[in-house]
Image (tube, rainbow, N blue to C red):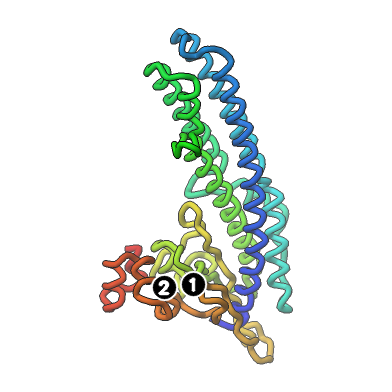
């Protein structure tokens, strides 16, 4: 890996901070919508004595509540402006490449439009993920209300089933739905930005020869992403320094990994100058050389850290050299 790619990785990680802030602001909006949805659902349940409802009246009320849930999830989906985010990330990625003195081309409007239309998260369109979450929330909501009514619970007990009670330490079904929605916001932002970056990289294949997987170097990185850190593939997915099959991050819910461009060397670009100095990357050890592998990173930590990250059994096998990081995902 050449030094220019390391500096690009450094700049990309700096830009990632702005994306995380954007994701956090979107999550705050989702939290506001969830609070409004819970308030409206509680109002519907409290509009009459549901414990005295006939089955027919109860089902009608539940249908109205399901419509409320579907409506609010539609608003949540609209909070993430896919088109604006994709265009912003295309521009930002192009500027990052241009910032080191390389002439970068911007993908055409047609390419960006196709990117937005074809964005998939874990193999499914984003709209389908939101629709599925709305359906799951409505299903769980109706099940809890029916069960509460069948057991002769009070209105407050039924509402507690839905929204929980922090004071009593009782979780509600909305807690899970809220976490799932926040994860979907994060994953949507990461998926769209990585798709946009790949569009820029492919548009500039005269100066970019591949991509490098960059995982976050801390104790929260999962066993699926650890072995991929530092691995490289060509722009069409052929392995360069690994036997792992190429895939686009996010690799799983709440994944924090990104794809960094691997540029051609100055010599390969036909520029007769010395290579630029190496950059750094962030870790829970502070700033370390950007080409630090996860193996080298783990070697600087204690056995206790390794046991917590990999699990005692895997950590012991890893220390003895009986398994590699690549084998952790086999």
Please tell me which of labels 2 and 1 falls first in the chain: 1
Real-space CA distance between mark 2 and mark 1, rounded to the nearest whole angstrom: 7 Å
Tag 2 near tag 1, CB within 8 Å: yes
- Which label number is shown at residue 113? none
Residue 228 in which image quadrant: bottom left
- Which label number is shown at residue 232? 1
User: Relative to 192, does residue 295 appear above or below in the rendering?
Assistant: below
Give percent across and percent down for residue 6.
59, 78
Q: Residues within 10 Å of mark 1 (few under 14, many from 20)?
A: many
At 55% from the left and 22% from the top, the residue drawn is 65
Give percent across and percent down for residue 92.
71, 63
Most extreme residue toward the front is: 167
Q: Secondary structure at mark 2?
A: loop
At 55% from the left and 51% from the top, the residue drawn is 187
Query: Which residue occupies the foreground of this view, 209 or 150?
Result: 150
Q: Report the quarter where the C terminus lies.
A: bottom left
Query: Which residue occupies the foreground of this view, 283 or 257?
Result: 283
Residue 34 in which image quadrant: top right
Q: How many marks can you see?
A: 2
Q: Residues within 10 Å of mark 2 (few under 14, many from 20)?
A: some
User: Relative to 58, does residue 231 appear above or below in the rendering?
Assistant: below
At 38% from the left and 77% from the top, the residue drawn is 302
Q: Which residue is mark 2?
A: 242
């Amino acid at each position: 890996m050449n030094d220019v790619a390391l500096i690009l990785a450094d700049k990309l990680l700096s830009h990632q901070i702005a994306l995380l802030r954007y994701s956090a602001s979107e999550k705050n909006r989702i939290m506001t919508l969830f609070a409004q949805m819970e308030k409206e659902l509680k109002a519907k349940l409290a509009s009459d004595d549901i414990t005295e409802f006939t089955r027919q009246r109860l089902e009608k009320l539940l249908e109205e509540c399901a419509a409320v849930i579907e409506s609010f999830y539609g608003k949540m989906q609209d909070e993430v402006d896919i088109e604006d985010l994709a265009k912003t990330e295309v521009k930002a990625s192009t500027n990052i490449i241009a910032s080191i003195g390389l002439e970068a081309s911007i993908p055409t409007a047609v390419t960006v439009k196709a990117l937005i239309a074809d964005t998939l998260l874990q193999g499914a369109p984003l709209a389908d993920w939101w629709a599925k979450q709305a359906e799951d929330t409505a299903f769980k909501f109706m099940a809890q209300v029916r069960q509460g009514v069948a057991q002769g619970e009070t209105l407050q007990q039924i509402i507690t089933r839905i929204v929980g009670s922090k004071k009593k330490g009782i979780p509600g079904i909305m807690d899970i739905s809220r976490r799932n929605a926040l994860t979907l916001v994060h994953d949507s932002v990461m998926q769209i930005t990585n798709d946009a970056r790949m569009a820029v990289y492919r548009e500039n294949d005269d100066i970019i020869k591949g991509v490098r997987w960059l995982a976050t170097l801390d104790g929260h990185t999962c066993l699926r992403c650890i072995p991929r850190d530092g691995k490289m593939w060509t722009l069409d997915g052929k392995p360069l320094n690994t036997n792992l099959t190429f895939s686009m991050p996010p690799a799983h819910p709440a994944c924090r990994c990104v794809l960094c461009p691997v540029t051609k060397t100055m010599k390969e670009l036909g520029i007769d100058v010395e290579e630029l100095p190496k950059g750094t990357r962030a870790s829970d050890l502070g700033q370390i050389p950007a080409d630090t592998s996860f193996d080298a990173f783990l070697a600087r930590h204690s056995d206790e850290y390794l046991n917590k990250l990999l699990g005692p059994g895997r950590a012991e096998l890893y220390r003895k050299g009986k398994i590699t990081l690549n084998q952790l995902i086999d």
